[in-house]
Amino acid sequence: MQLIRLSNLVAVAGLALCGSAAWAAEAMVTPEDLLRDARFPAAYSAALGPKAKTAWLARLGNSALVRTVTVGGVAYQVATPCKPHDCADNNMLVMYAPASGTVVGMLHEKDRSTLIGSPAPALAAEVEKLWRKEFRQQ
């Protein structure tokens, strides 16, 4: 009888873990998911301007999973792509607001950082702060 109860417990625990793993997998957003979003590609391309044709930027290459931050009451999905084999000198923090379809961010190439997407001054300061935290550990 004790063996049956233990096996039932193991089965229930296994189902619970599988359910949790499935939920976690659904909650993860990848840069590829952003590129498949109906409004993101056009807004992202417009924010980048001529840089949109740069391969690592176009693919959002080498980015960690997308995370969500809230700035000024607006939820943004944040991706942090970088150029393969040159992340220290070529990287970007891109923020996408799905509710409005807007994209802002900070593009860093060599020793030059450029805001993209024309963020308002308060948002620009937050973009720079998030970029420094991500890429400069400050």
Image (spheres, helix red, strand yellow):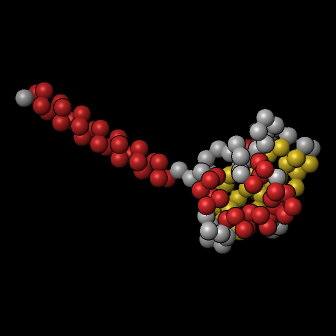
Q: Residue 122: percent from the left, percent from the top?
A: 79, 64
Image quarter of the N terminus: top left
Residue 22 in sight from this viewpoint: yes
Residue 92 image offset from top left, x and y in percent: 78, 50
Query: Which quarter shows the C terminus?
Result: top right
**Which of 51/133 is in front?**
51
Position of 20 with respect to 59 (left or right) is left
Q: Is residue 137 left or right of residue 114?
A: left
- Judged from this view, the residue extending furthest toward the top is 3
Tally the marks.
0
Q: In this rendering, does residue 67 appear at all?
A: no
Q: Nearer the viewer, residue 105 or 83?
A: 83
Residue sitting at the far right = 111
Which residue is farthest bottom?
100
Give residue 47's position: percent from left, percent from top.
Answer: 80, 64
Q: Residue at x 76, y 44 (%)?
A: 82
Q: Is residue 95 above or below residue 83?
A: below
Residue at (38, 46) in percent of width and height: 20
Residue at image coords 47%, 53%? 26
Which residue sits at x=70%, y=59%?
Answer: 95
51 on left or right of 75 = right
In percent of width and height, residue 132 lies at 79, 45
